[in-house]
Amino acid sequence: MSAMRPKLAVYPGSFDPLTNGHVDIIERGERLFERIVIAILVNTEKEPLFSAEERLEITQDVFREHGNVEVETYDGLLVDYATDRGADVIVRGLRAISDFEIEMQMALMNRRLSESIETVFMMPSERYTYVSSRLTKEIFTLGGSISGLVPEAVERRLREKSASARIDNAGIS
Ligand code: PNS
């Protein structure tokens, strides 16, 4: 039975920023797969809050103690990256019906591009079903509390970023 278990899963995304919903999915994935690679897309279409390098550092920091989790960045087609890594599975989180349409489209398109890689959907804990990177960014930017929505390392980096932006705006550096 264990010989049939998928060994390596890729969990791709923008992770801008990493949320506790992402962390929840990764921890569930660790129970299903021998190894899971968090794959951070370098070139998101939108202007990212954190650079790819920062997102890599933060995510590595959060999963420092997890021996079966790796963190990498990728560019280009996800299926090409997954094939290069020898992954059997792409993991995506599904929070609500509203995620389903785009996720199904991506899964079927990725299957068309590579028949050998299967997309597996996982549901986060219900306490994270309304958490998204986009809302987290918006709340933080507008001065609201994001405590409990993101890992402590993300909160810290966000605070540092806004402090340095304030210094820049004040013309101190
Ligand atoms: O966190 P996101 O933004 O929902 O993740 C989307 C992501 C990064 C998984 C997707 O946009 C992606 O894989 N992009 C890489 C380019 C690619 O393979 N495009 C075809 C997808 S069907």
Image (cartoon, rainbow, N blue to C red):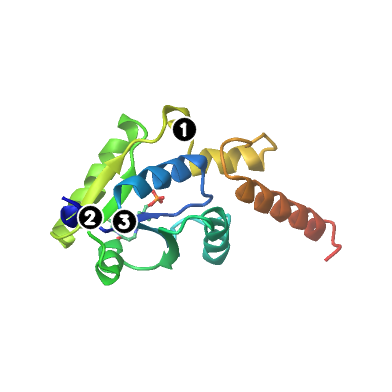
Q: Label 2: which residue?
A: 6
Above or below for 147 versus 45 = above
Is residue 91 left or right of 52 when viewed as pictured?
Answer: left
* Residue ID for mark 1: 128
Q: How many marks?
A: 3
Mark earlier in primary sequence (3, 1) = 3
> Can residue 169 be seen here?
yes
Disc 2, disc 3: CB below 8 Å? yes
For this rendering, which residue is in front, 25 or 30? Answer: 30
* Residue located beneath label 3 in the image: 34
| Residue 33 placement, left or right of 115 | right
Mark 3, other Cα within 10 Å: few <14 / some 14–19 / many ≥20 = some
Say which amino acid is labelled 1. Answer: Tyr
Q: Earlier in the sequence, mark 1 or mark 2?
A: 2
State the CA–CA distance, disc 1 to disc 2. 26 Å
Type of residue at label 3?
Glu
